[in-house]
Image (cartoon, grey):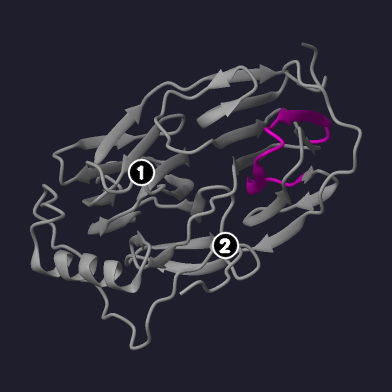
Amino acid sequence: MTPGEPALYGCTVAAEAEPESVLLPGHDVPLGRYTTVRRLLPQRPRRMVGAWCFVDHFGPDDVTGRPGMQVPPHPHTGLQTVTWLAEGEILHRDSLGNVQSIVPGQLNLMTAAHGIAHSEQTPPEHPPGMHGLQLWVALPEEARHGQARFEHHAALPVLRDGDVTVTVVVGEAGPLRSPALVHTPLLGAEVLFEGPPGQHRRHRLPVDPAFETAVLAMSGTAEVAGVALSPGSLLYLGQGRTAVPMEAAGPARLFVLGGTPFEEPLVMWWNFVGRSHEEIARARDDWMRGGRFGVVPGGQEPLPAPEMPTVRLKARDRHGRVLS
């Protein structure tokens, strides 16, 4: 394949009109004492993209002489966490006994299911930069009550199209399939535009037309499906596309999210994804009492849960409509 040639992976592009897109800016949220993230999901206009229900983008930050990310032990239920780095290093510890460092190009995937606790910390000796994503995937009913699990994947499938590199982190795109275990049809892929500024590059990433699709700009500027995208924003592209056209006139790093619409109602509160107020309240009580979530090695003080809200938590569908 020649540089700049659209990569279709054998996919036929439909001639029908593409769905409308919605550009969603992020908002800053403190994460622990030393890190601020840009939260891109959930938002009022768009709560989910497929089963992706939570997206935090952090950095790029200079952490020279600074602690970097220091998130103490905390619990999760009903979800998978996906950690992806562009710069830096994070050490994961969990209550299953896993201790695993992650660096750029690798994937840490934790399946909370009925319950797990973990911590995420920048090690004392670390690279000068910190930049990455922390994402959640909602688990369907048949998977959310099972045993917790952790996976580390040091190598992932990669396609190179001239100065464009596509890494399939979870799910599949064209012939590329990630080894990570997922429970609904899903896509998470990084698209990296490299080379000198002023050199125009194009790429078309094939997607399943049954998927909702969105693209996050991590760094650089790009045009996605005809919309200008700047760092820290998320472009929701809807359903019905067979490919996502992307182009950049300089270095840029994008992350593509996709999946079939998640039709089960959700209650999301603090670090829990459930189906009812009562379920969330039980998870909180179990964390504060100890037992269900186990103990994270390392001797760090666990993060206490906030008080439950004074109003009843409501289950919502993927559009944000209250169901109970």
317 or 36: nearer the viewer? 317
- Count of number-bearing discs: 2
Q: Is residue 68 above or below residue 178?
A: below
Vertically, is 65 above or below 225? below
Residue appearing at x 84%, y 31% in the figure: 200
Q: Nearer the viewer, mark 2 or mark 1?
A: 1
| Residue contact at pointers 2 and 1, CB within 8 angstroms | no
Q: Residue furthest top?
A: 1
Q: Amino acid at mark 1?
A: Glu
Secondary structure of the residue carrying numbered label 1: loop
Marks 2/1: CA–CA distance: 22 Å
Residue at image position (28%, 72%) is 278
Q: Position of residue 85 (x, y in %)?
A: 46, 40
Q: What's drawn in magenta, residue-wise?
A: 197-222
Residue type pointed to by label 2: Arg
Q: Residues within 10 Å of mark 1 (few under 14, many from 20)?
A: few
Residue, far bottom: 310
> Is residue 87 shown to the viewer in this render?
no
Residue 160 drawn at (x, y percent): 65, 18
Q: Does the magenta run of residues contain 59?
A: no
Q: Assign a secondary structure to mark 2.
A: loop
Q: Is residue 78 above or below residue 251?
A: below
Q: Which residue is mark 1?
A: 142
Q: Would you identify the image quadrant in which residue 233 lies?
A: bottom right
Q: Of the numbered discs in the image, which one, if any, rests on residue 47?
A: 2
